[in-house]
């Protein structure tokens, strides 16, 4: 929880700092664009998190995005030239191929238990596999049925008569093909890593090259797009189904329900860290603000109500932020927590340095930061702000003697309300990709934290040998992690392609895997494995996009954007490592 608060505090600070220096940061267009881009990178970050939790890595995410995006456009164009009804036949063929690959992978992994040579013999020489089935039918019965079901489905696809389908159904089937292809790629990665024994770095690096080459070969290296067709499908990336006020209203209701559940749980398990009343009060404020704006949206109430609500959030958030910061420092001073106060001073010094840099930048006639000294000063200021803020929040959260956890949450929430008061919520429309990312994040978070398989993944990352000796099928968990990662990359590839509507196979999706890994690491996933949070990954993706947007908004030279983002990531990773070592020293 403390890592999530640290990265979320950083996100709030960057947004607030940028919006104060340049109000254009909170314009309707900029907010909607930032939310949409955050959604895309958040989806692939979630997939990368599952792999990183198992102490693995996937370098093929960007190439999978490029392959799936180009294949989607190519397949939809090819489908329009085929006779009606061909989509269903080919769906059976592709689905059967997927089931057959699952069955074949499951079936051929069993001989590897007797040794690498025996397993490879069963793959290369089919009669050896038949002999193995005769001796181990009890172990191979279920995978053999899956294998046979895949072959039967493929046969049905060949023999079934052509059935005409509506265009919308054919389009949906093509999207299903893309998801199935993504799952196949994940299965291939898992098989090569777990059964053949290759390193994840090598497997996914080869995938990066192979998938990029396949995309260029299939499309003849021609730019792909949808033109003005398939507007219904493109609404998945370009649609805006609701306003920000409705989303804040739903968030407030969710916080109130969460507070109620925490209160009921606290009665049975004393010592729960965060006060339910703090969550309930934040949720009630969100319901009030979002409800007022939502009522204006649906009933066309007079505009002065929205203005009043904006001013109330702005003033109330500012007062709450000031009171929270003063109280946190007063309590730390009263209890003589000098390290916490030092972290606060470092954060304030970093803010002063950044303010000086931006003041100099605005007063300069040059187009960007043309002096290496000021560029270095910017990186140092950002590092001071990130390191100080993370250490400050970590110290306040860790020190149970202060009892300030609820105050920390309330202070961050007040900063959020201050920003919300500067935002035209009644005019900001929520992009559809954001809702898709929220749904996927809820599913992934529930799977990781509330299912036995999620616990298995975490245990695998912490100590694979101990997890195997405790009875966990570690190879199946690795399979699942890479399949989830590939599936998330496939979903993101569909959304990216529908958004840009013009894809160059040679570059589409390039380096996106680095953004996904950076979002996961910033969000609290340790590259050693065994640690991670879906909420933190989403916030990490938001930090990446907000930083990129802030660099453009504030007029900083675009030549420095990668250097600044890299410095921020490095500062976050260094802060995480330092805090981990401090925690280990205190525990010992």
Image: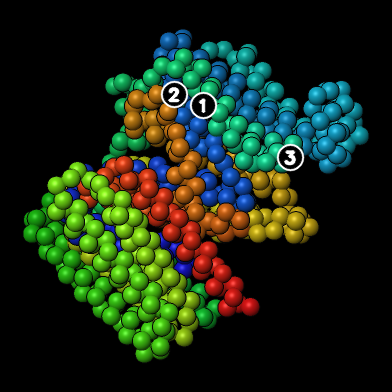
Q: Earlier in the sequence, mark 3 or mark 1?
A: 3
Q: Looking at the picture, does residue 178 appear above or below residue 35? A: above
- The residue sitting at 59% across, 72% down in the picture is 584
Label 3 – label 1 distance at C-alpha = 24 Å
Q: Tell which circle, 2 or 1, labels the residue nearer the N-terminal end.
A: 1
The x and y percentages for residue 185 are: 59, 32
Residue 324, image x, y percentages? 29, 77
State the image coordinates of residue 377 (x, y, percent, origin top left): 31, 58
Write the residue at 69% across / 36% down: 192
Tag 2 secondary structure: loop
Q: Secondary structure at mark 1?
A: helix
Name the residue beneath numbered marker 1: 212
Q: CA distance from mark 3 to mark 2?
A: 31 Å
Task: State how the image is colored.
Answer: rainbow
Q: Earlier in the sequence, mark 3 or mark 2?
A: 3
Judged left or right of residue 212, residue 344 is left
Q: Nearer the viewer, residue 297 or 197?
A: 197
Q: CA distance from mark 2 to mark 1?
A: 7 Å
- Callout 3: helix, strand or loop? loop
Q: Between 392 and 370, which is closer to the camera in this rendering?
A: 370
Q: Which mark is residue 197?
A: 3
Label 2 neighbour load within 10 Å: few <14, some 14-19, many 20+: many
Is 427 positioned to the left or the right of 127 in the image? left
Say whether residue 279 is left or right of residue 175: left
Confirm or deny contact between disc 2 and disc 1 (CB under 8 A).
Answer: yes
Residue at 29% of width from left, 42% of height from top? 558
Q: Residues within 10 Å of mark 3 (few under 14, many from 20)?
A: few
Where does label 2 land, which residue?
505
| Disc 1 crowd, CA 10 A, few/some/many (<14, 14-19, 20+) | many
The image quadrant of residue 318 is bottom left
Name the residue at the bottom extreme.
Answer: 334
């Amino acid at each position: 929880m403390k890592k999530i608060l640290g990265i979320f505090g950083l996100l709030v600070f960057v947004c607030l700092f940028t919006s104060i220096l340049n109000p254009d940061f909170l314009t309707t267009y900029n907010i909607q664009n930032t939310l949409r881009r955050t959604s895309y990178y958040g989806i692939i970050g979630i997939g990368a998190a599952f792999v990183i939790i198992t102490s693995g890595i996937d370098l093929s995410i960007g190439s999978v995005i490029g392959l799936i995006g180009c294949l989607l456009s190519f397949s939809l164009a090819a489908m329009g030239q085929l006779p009606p009804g061909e989509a269903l036949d080919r769906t059976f063929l592709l689905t059967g191929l997927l089931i057959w690959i699952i069955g074949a992978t499951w079936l051929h992994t069993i001989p590897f238990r007797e040794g690498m040579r025996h397993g490879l013999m069963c793959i290369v020489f089919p009669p050896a596999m038949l002999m193995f089935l005769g001796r181990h039918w009890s172990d191979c019965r279920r995978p053999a049925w899956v294998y046979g079901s895949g072959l039967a489905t493929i046969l049905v696809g060949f023999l079934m008569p052509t059935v005409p389908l509506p265009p919308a159904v054919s389009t949906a089937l093509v999207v299903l093909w893309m998801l199935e292809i993504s799952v196949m790629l994940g299965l291939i990665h898992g098989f090569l890593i777990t059964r053949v024994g290759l390193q994840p770095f090598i497997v996914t690096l080869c995938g990066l090259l192979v998938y990029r080459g396949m995309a260029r070969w299939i499309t003849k290296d021609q730019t792909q797009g949808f033109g003005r067709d398939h507007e219904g499908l493109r609404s998945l990336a370009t649609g805006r189904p609701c306003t920000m006020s409705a989303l804040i209203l739903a968030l407030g209701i969710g916080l109130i329900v969460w507070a109620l559940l925490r209160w009921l749980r606290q009665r049975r398990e004393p010592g729960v860290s965060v006060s339910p009343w703090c969550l309930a009060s934040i949720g009630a404020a969100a319901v009030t603000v979002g409800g007022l704006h939502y009522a204006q949206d649906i009933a066309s109430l007079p505009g002065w109500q929205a203005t009043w609500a904006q001013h109330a959030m702005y003033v109330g958030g500012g007062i709450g932020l000031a009171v929270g910061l003063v109280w946190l420092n007063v309590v730390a001073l009263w209890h003589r927590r000098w390290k916490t106060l030092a972290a606060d001073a470092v954060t304030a010094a970093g803010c002063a340095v950044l303010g000086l840099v931006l003041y100099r930048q605005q007063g300069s006639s040059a187009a960007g930061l043309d002096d290496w000294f000021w560029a270095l000063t910017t990186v140092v200021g950002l590092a001071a702000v990130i390191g100080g803020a993370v250490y400050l929040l970590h110290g306040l959260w860790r020190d149970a003697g202060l009892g300030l956890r609820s105050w920390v949450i309330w202070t961050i929430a007040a900063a959020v309300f201050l920003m919300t008061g500067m935002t035209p919520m009644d005019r900001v429309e929520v992009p559809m990709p954001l809702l898709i990312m929220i749904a996927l994040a809820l599913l992934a978070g529930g799977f990781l934290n509330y299912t036995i398989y999620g616990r298995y993944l975490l245990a695998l990352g912490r100590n694979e040998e101990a997890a195997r000796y405790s009875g966990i099928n570690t190879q199946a968990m690795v399979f699942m992690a890479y399949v989830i990662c590939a599936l998330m990359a496939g979903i993101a590839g569909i959304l990216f392609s529908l958004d840009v509507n013009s894809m160059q196979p040679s570059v589409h999706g390039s380096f996106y895997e680095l953004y996904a890994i950076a979002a996961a690491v910033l969000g609290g996933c340790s590259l050693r494995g065994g640690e991670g949070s879906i909420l933190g990954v989403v916030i990490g993706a938001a930090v990446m996009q907000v930083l990129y947007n802030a660099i453009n908004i504030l007029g900083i030279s675009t030549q420095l954007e990668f250097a600044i983002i890299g410095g921020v990531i490095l500062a976050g990773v260094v802060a995480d490592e330092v805090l981990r070592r401090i925690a280990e020293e205190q525990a010992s």
